[in-house]
Image: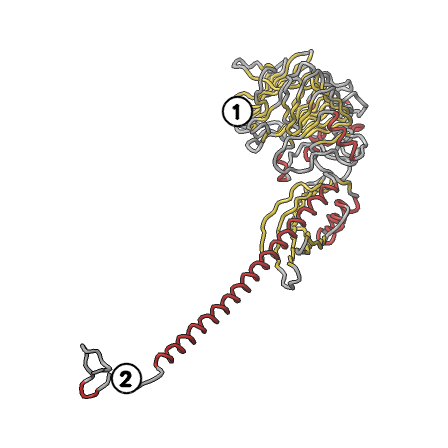
Amino acid sequence: MSSIFSPRTRPWPDGAEPAGRGRRGTAGLAVVLLLAVFSGLGLGTIWLSQLYIKMNAHRKFSRLAAYASENGLKRGLEDLESWIQAAGPLSPISDTRLGDFRDDPKSGFAALLEEGLHAGFPRRISESDGSMGWETLATCVPMGLEDRGPYLRIKAGLNIVSSGTWGRLSRKKDSSLEASLGILAGRLPLPSIPLFIGEEMTEAEKAGFLEANGISFPAGEDGLAAPVIPATGKGLIPKGADDLVAKALDIHIFSPQDLAPAKLREVLGLEPSTDPVPDGVYLIRDDLGLGGVFVQGDIDEMVLAISGDAQVIVFRQALGEWRLEFNPSRSRTEFLTPEAVFAYDLVPLGIIIVNGKIASLGGGVAAADGSVAMVTDREVPAILSGIGLTIVSSDRITLSSHLILQGARWQDGIPYLKDSRSELVIFSTGRDALTREARQGGISVAENAPDDLKVQASITSGGDFEIGGSGKTVEVLGAVHAAGFAGHGNSLRIAPDRRFAAGDFGENAPFTVQPQFAVYSLKVLAWREF
């Protein structure tokens, strides 16, 4: 007999069925609920993905706008540097403009900048590159002023604001740059000018002049003024040193016609007479202390040397030898003359006036017995740290050996003076110190000077600057100013004294004849993004 059940199974007892067998739709409801949950999750994921895409796009475009704003700042700074370079390391300014600024710095600053840089602030730039665009605004205001008599040292605040955009987006990204501008205005100290040749040249002629004469500048840090020949060939080198002569002789009111032989003899401590001052070396001294050194007549040899903690200067003339030794730390000076020895508990003023020529100038060494000899076969420091010397000659000066400041060092062939507090100025006026009559003047490197001569000084010549001999490379750590230049196939390397980038100069340097404008430093202080 057929059965709906397997023979091995039997029906539910008493016809009972499992619980729930009669309920319908539970699985379908679960499926619908699960479908709703996963649909919500999917829609949420899609929404989050869209939000993420929008956020990434916003971040991307914001970053691109920030890049545009950054480009604007760089272009603003580049434009300013190019503008200053195009204006030249020096620009003549009028006494009227300088006087207006002295009277009212706040209102006269814009006009002073406009005359010195041949343009004014504010300075605007609007540029684009592809989808990037930027607008830049540069402003400059005076922040500080220091009056140093012949010239002004000005500190200005520079602010560059840039707005960058990307594509058609209206949203802009802003950033700003703060910097300081160091400016000199007035009759500037000549050590602040790395190179000046008093010949009128075009821009093309300047580059050709440097190449033809073997003049170069080693790479280094940013300095005071660009190492190029200034645009003007006049109004820089003074034709005399009246101020320095008056200061060395301790004469408050001085003009050449007022300094008669009788007056000069009185200043030098000689017997009253109307006769000319005899040749010799004179240390100026009075009741108030020591002045500078005055030399009448030609000097055969002048040697600078260091003896322990003292500075030594030896003068040799046909009449004999004079030796000046002084120590600033001990405030002690000894002056040895052919006739006597003088000692003082003071130190002299660092100005030496030579009313004649210096046939040989260089550095040397001091022996234990007190003798001093010039050295040409090696480099030895010749100017004591902390000493500032200004040597002024009315006639020609010949450099015979190295003149190196104590504390100077070379790094990768580039000289540095950051560890030195010394300064040397060499100035040939080409004019008699008393009568202002014309002399030959000029500064030259001796033919028998070292082939790798190193001179760490500001060299100023009212005549020419000449390098004698052949095969020489003259390195000047400082500056060179001359009415003309004759290299004779030799090389001249000029490394500007980077200490002047702080705008600090010695008190006994010659100054430009006419007022000049120069930017000596540009420093970035802060970079901000908004």
Where is 359 relative to 478, above or below?
Answer: above
Q: Which SS class for mark 2?
A: loop
Where is 15 relative to 135, above or below?
Answer: below
Q: Are marks 1 and 2 in contact (CB under 8 Å)?
A: no
Give the labeled residue for mark 1.
Answer: 309
Question: Label 1 crowding class (10 Å Cα cut-off): few <14, some 14-19, many 20+?
Answer: few
Give the labeled residue for mark 2.
Answer: 20
Question: Label 2 crowding class (10 Å Cα cut-off): few <14, some 14-19, many 20+?
Answer: few
Identify residue type, mark 1.
Asp
Identify residue type, mark 2.
Gly
How many marks on residues? 2
Picture quarter containing residue 240? top right
> At which x and y percent is residue 382?
59, 22
Q: Residue drawn at (57%, 61%), measured in percent from left and top?
A: 57
- Pair 1/2: label in front: 2
> At which x and y percent is residue 321?
64, 14
Earlier sequence position, callout 1 versus callout 2? 2
Res 362 visible: yes
Q: Work out whether residue 124 or residue 1 is closer to the camera in this orientation and state it.
A: 1
Q: Residue drawn at (64%, 34%), measured in percent from left and top?
A: 506
Q: Work out whether residue 114 or residue 279 is closer to the camera in this orientation and state it.
A: 114
Q: Residue drawn at (62%, 40%), measured in percent from left and top?
A: 502
Position of 50 with respect to 397 (left or right) is left
How is this picture coloured?
Answer: secondary structure
Q: Residue 248, labelled with which disc?
A: none
Q: Which SS class for mark 1?
A: loop
- Label 1, label 2: how many angstroms apart (C-alpha)? 115 Å
Q: Work out whether residue 46 or residue 141 is closer to the camera in this orientation and state it.
A: 46
Picture quarter containing residue 15? bottom left
